[in-house]
Image (spheres, coloured by chain):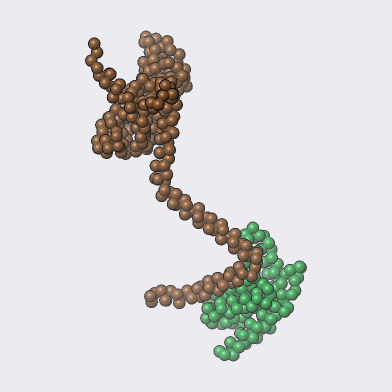
Chain colours: A green, B brown
Amino acid sequence: MIRENINLGINFIILLLAQMLLFNKINAFGDLNPMVYLLFFIHYPTDRSQTGFITAAFLLGFFIDFLSQGSGAHTLGALTVAFVRPFVIRQAFGSNIEIPPYLQEDPRMLNRWLLIVELILIHHFIYFTVVFWDITHIFSILKNSFNTFFMSLILIALLINFYPTKR
Amino acid sequence: MQRILSTLVRFRSFIVYLFFAAVALLLLNNRSFYHASQFDKTRLSLSAWLHLKSTAISDYFDLNRQNEILLMENLALKKLALKANAFPLYDQYYHAKEPFPFELQTARIIKTDLQKQRNFVLINKGHVDGVQSEMGVIGASGIVGIVDQVTTHFSSIISILHLDLKINAQIKNTEVFGSLSWKGTLPKAFQLQDIVTTNPVQLGDTIVTGGRSSYFPMGIPLGVITQVDRPQSEGYYQIDVTLFDNPLQYKYVYLLNNMDFDEIKSLENQPQE
């Protein structure tokens, strides 16, 4: 348990630093930055307390915002993804199926990728909605969400392989 | 208490989410000028919307009082309008100190008959308000009737929709006088009688009160001529008149108190020699 917590903490710090120092500086096609810290939400064990998860998500989003001079969009995005994750898991895997504690170990590829896609889409949509904060900019919100979504998805698909599959 | 606690525990993740979301929004408000101004806009439109709704509700409950205020305003205007209409009869009063002989007061209709041939209307004013029998009663645009019985707090009015009531009427801007009475069918269907066929009468002519009675001043608009028949054998027209207003629709009416009524009545009651 303690080791698991330490692993989670290391994961938290590595993703935070990677996002801060590397991925926030990519600025592809002008201003697109993939958000790989979403790996934290995929990797976080499903058998843990939901309140603790929401708190961790808040801290992660808050630090990213704080260190990148952001206003609070990462915080709200991360917070919302953490809150809706149980519903999305049930939606992606089915409500009657046993959910493994580590989602990246689950052999059902299609369900797993459905979950990842949904989490990224929800996060990006919330993030850009908060950034623009104006319904008249809905087209820009959707455009930025989808563009960033593809970059995030590709990078997450690559990086998820670095997680150990055995506990 | 136990239930409240268990509900809080059950929804703890939602409560934690709301708490952190509020913190994040607060940060957003403090750290970004753009978001602060956007929040201000939202706050403004929300408070304006709320204010509008609350005003609409309070306005609704204030309608009765506003009605009373409007009624009082209308009373003053009505008096001026009647005075202006009756100018040819009472013009000397504009130069003398003696006022227009009709005093007005308002009343609310509490019951209206509509299915009989001889209809009555009840109003909420009686002796204590200075109502006397044989006072004229008018509505917003037209006549309602003449006061019949008066009790302490209520009065009954012989409605204009009463087969026996005849109102002295005149074709506007002419010297042609007749008497207007209900036909007993539709509330706006009236007939104008006693007009000799030598007088010129046109369709669409306006009918006003004649002023040759002590109940109503002259010039109150009543209706328009919609049909004129000229029977060969008789010397009088058969004229159909449609009223401007349905007399059943009034909720508030004006009572006309003719100050000269007693004097006129005493003359009428003197034995003829």
Residue A23, compared with residue B108, is above or below; it is below
Question: Image quarter for residue B179?
Answer: top left
Seen in the image, is A132 located left or right of residue B100? right
In front of the other: A158 or A24: A24
Q: What residue appears at the point 39 percent right and 15 percent down from the top-left corner? A: B195
Q: Is residue A89 left or right of residue B101?
A: right
Give the answer, above or below, for where B152 lies relative to A53: above
User: The N terminus of chain B lies in which quarter of the figure?
Assistant: bottom left
Q: Is residue A38 visible?
A: no
- Residue at screen point 66% across, 72% down: A70
The quadrant in which the C terminus of chain B is found is top left
Quadrant assignment, res A78: bottom right
Above or below, B254 against B45 in this view is above
Number of numbered callouts drawn: 0
Instruction: Identify whether B174 is placed above or below B7.
Output: above
Q: At x 29% / y 33%, what residue is drawn? A: B131
Identity of the residue furthest to the top in this view: B233
- Percent across and percent down for residue A146 are 68, 66
Q: Residue at x 30, y 38 (%)?
A: B124
Q: Residue A121: where, in percent of width, then height?
A: 63, 69
The answer to whether one can see residue A9 in this image is: yes
Q: In the picture, residue B236 is in which quadrant?
A: top left
Residue extending farthest to the front is: B97
| Along the viewing direction, whichever of A40 and B173 lies nearer the viewer | B173
B13 and B105: which is toward the camera? B105
* Position in image of residue A113 (x %, y %): 63, 74
- Locate residue A94 relative to residue B187 in the image: left or right: right
